Image: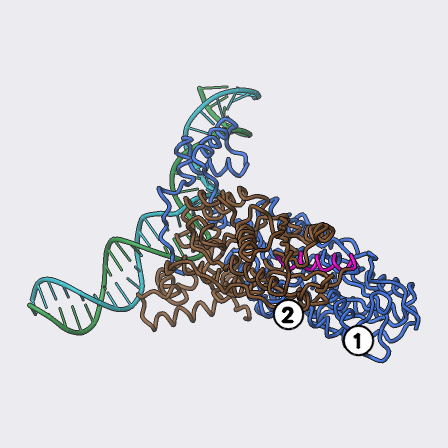
Chain colours: A blue, B brown, C green, D cyan
DNA sequence: AGCCCGTCGTGAACCGGTAAAGTACTGATT
DNA sequence: AATCAGTACTTTACCGGTTCACGACGGGCT
């Protein structure tokens, strides 16, 4: 990347100009602008006035160079770029993060990566080049390969996921196990015996937690045939999984999905197969983005405030950066929001 | 990527360490790492070896400070954070941008802002503090207030929108007018006489262009009653607009939407009102994200490759930064993809 | 008066690179 | 032999802040 000619008219205003105008040294300006003791209130005021007059604000880059960290937070998402557009969860999550960052005039550095190794390398690069002041790690896997290199780095990191998965990084998490159990109990209470689950990739931590809880709760309630399908979290796979579930001889009367997109796709499949929702099959979505309210019937969902989740994550990261953080933080457990897509099974 | 043993653990490895190990001055290292002429191939190789051995890569912050721009591209989106999660267009668009940035090891700095003035101020801040090397401007309005301050800044900017809107900034655009005309002609050819349009906010440039083209084409075909509703681009407003259109005495037999979300919401409303799609009302979405294939019936749409759109935007920005850019760039016009949601109007 | 001490502020050394000017050496030209 | 050009580096001066050792000043105390 060649340096573009700087077409800025006039010279850029620096700390020196402010110092000159205020009649002090640049060290004094620095002290004043960082609210540290060492200049008198009078001088301080004179410096601020001068700065205001010149429209000066400290050059972030120069600040970073001498020790302090950038007001930039890194987030790498490991998935094919084309799929991101369909994941309402991440967009709401990001918007929550953004809200907190914006309060502090920080920004989010976003990058899509192909695999976890590339992601780990990227974080190293970002940290070493002082591009970011901290990072948000998501989508933990069993024995996640990102953990060892990042631990060695010493970068402030907030992990999103159950503490058992996050390899010791301070985490923010939601109780997927309880939520999955509640989903099953609710459907069982409606009278369903054959409940299926369309989940995310097998290796993904929170999918695994939900899968385990699903199975355990089914067993606990004496229900068998709790079929589970692992997918890649995209609509088409959700559709395919639904189709194959609904075609089987002992087809389920209720299906729990791991996100909204797959549930919406599942609803379309049911309609395409001439099955009525919820009479022939109940559908339960997860996350509860606005998407769930846009279908007919609207989708029941395990709902939580994803925006708020993102906010908590960002807040936690700031605590970590500032060294005031203590312990993992839990956000509310997804709770059932019944709408039109769940009901008692139709007796045949 | 194993961490090599560093001589002084704890201390950060800098260009000086590399220079020392390679037995040259740091100037030589700089020359080698920027692929500039001035060192022999032998020395160059020795420098690279030393750098590899120490695991050194240039400190981005220091680079920025001495003149060159960051490998970071800024994108500010002006809308309430909570809505972002539902706009498949932007997510696909961003993923396209990301793809091109990633090729060049650049990242996207994302920020949500509340209004256009805040957005302009943010770009000034980013540029002056050398945080970004260029920016992407979207959602142009009539007489957009961001244009004058940004022109004065001299920052490399790529504008997304019709050249008539982008105030002289080099632009990448898609022919919304032709696409809107095609949508109307198609529905008219199916036999529809009363066609409505649920559009975006009135002040938004591309919504305005589509509105004008819609009206012109309706007139050209001798159709009147081309009702248009302006919304805020979100599902609920799309639902409300659809409901009110379908309740009117001379209700339209076809509705064109300005994005997918509103069309999906519209489909749910039709279903809720007991109207069949497409017999009672045809629905035509815009953008054609995968969402359109997840409903039943699947939505016909004016479809374009939004991911590719994003890629072209990013590529153009790099050309601008490198000074090799020439002229506006047009990406393919959205074209009609008929699916199940459009058909001849039902005679009553 | 002599001493100590706290406050206010200065000056210079850094942070880790880039870039332009300067030096040393080689080989070709006059 | 002297001049010149070109290559391969080195030196040095930045970029725009932060930080820290140090000096000057004024007041209270013995």
**Rendered residue at 69%/71% (across/down):** A236
Mark 2 → mark 1, Cα distance in angstroms = 34 Å
Magenta region: B259-274
Q: Nearer the viewer, residue A247 or B319?
A: A247
The one of B296 and A179 positioned closer to us in this rendering: B296
Chain ID at mark 1: A
Residue A145, numbered label: 2
Q: Is residue B262 magenta?
A: yes
Up-down: is A28 above or below A290?
A: above
Residue at image point 53% right, 51% down = B212
- Residue D1 lies, in percent from the top left, at 7, 66
Whole-percent x, y for residue A269 in the image: 75, 71
The quarter in which the N terminus of chain A is drawn is bottom left
Give residue B157's position: percent from left, percent from top: 45, 53
In this picture, residue B273 sits left or right of residue A158: right
- Find out whether residue B174 is within the magenta segment: no
Q: Residues within 10 Å of mark 2 (few under 14, many from 20)?
A: some
Q: Is residue A250 visible?
A: yes
Name the residue tied to disc 1.
Answer: A245
Query: Mark 1: which secondary structure?
Result: helix
Q: How many marks?
A: 2
| Residue B62 circle label | none
Depth order, front residue of B276/A24: B276
Q: Locate residue B281: give its quadrant.
A: bottom right
Q: Is residue B7 visible?
A: no
């Amino acid at each position: 990347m060649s340096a573009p000619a700087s077409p800025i008219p006039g010279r850029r205003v620096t700390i020196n100009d402010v110092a000159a105008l205020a009649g002090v040294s640049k060290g004094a300006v620095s002290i004043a602008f960082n609210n540290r003791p060492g200049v008198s209130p009078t001088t301080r005021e004179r410096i601020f006035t001068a700065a205001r007059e010149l429209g000066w604000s400290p050059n972030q880059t120069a600040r970073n160079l001498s020790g302090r960290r950038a007001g930039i937070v890194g987030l790498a998402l490991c998935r094919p770029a084309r799929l991101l557009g369909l994941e309402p969860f991440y967009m709401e999550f990001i918007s929550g993060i953004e809200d907190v960052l914006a309060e502090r005039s920080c920004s989010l550095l976003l990058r899509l990566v192909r695999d976890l190794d590339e992601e780990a390398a990227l974080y190293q690069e970002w940290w070493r080049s002082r591009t970011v002041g901290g990072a948000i790690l998501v989508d933990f896997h069993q024995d996640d390969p990102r953990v060892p290199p990042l631990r060695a780095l010493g970068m402030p990191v907030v992990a999103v996921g159950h503490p058992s998965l996050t390899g010791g990084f301070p985490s923010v998490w939601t109780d997927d196990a309880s939520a999955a159990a509640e989903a099953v109990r609710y459907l069982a209470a409606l009278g369903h015996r054959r409940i299926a689950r369309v989940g995310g990739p097998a290796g993904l931590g929170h999918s695994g937690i939900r899968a385990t809880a699903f199975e355990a709760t089914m067993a606990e309630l004496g229900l068998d045939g709790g079929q589970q399908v692992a997918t890649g979290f995209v609509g088409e796979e959700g559709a395919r999984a639904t189709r194959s579930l609904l075609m089987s001889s002992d087809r389920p009367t209720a299906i729990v999905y791991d996100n909204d997109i797959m549930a919406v796709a599942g609803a379309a499949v049911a309609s395409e197969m001439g099955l009525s929702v919820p009479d022939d099959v109940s559908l339960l979505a997860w996350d509860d983005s606005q998407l769930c309210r846009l279908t007919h019937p609207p989708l029941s969902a395990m709902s939580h405030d994803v925006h708020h989740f993102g906010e908590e994550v960002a807040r936690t990261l700031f605590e970590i950066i500032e060294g005031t953080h203590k312990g993992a933080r839990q956000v509310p457990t997804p709770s059932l929001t019944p709408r039109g897509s769940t009901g008692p099974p139709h007796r045949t």
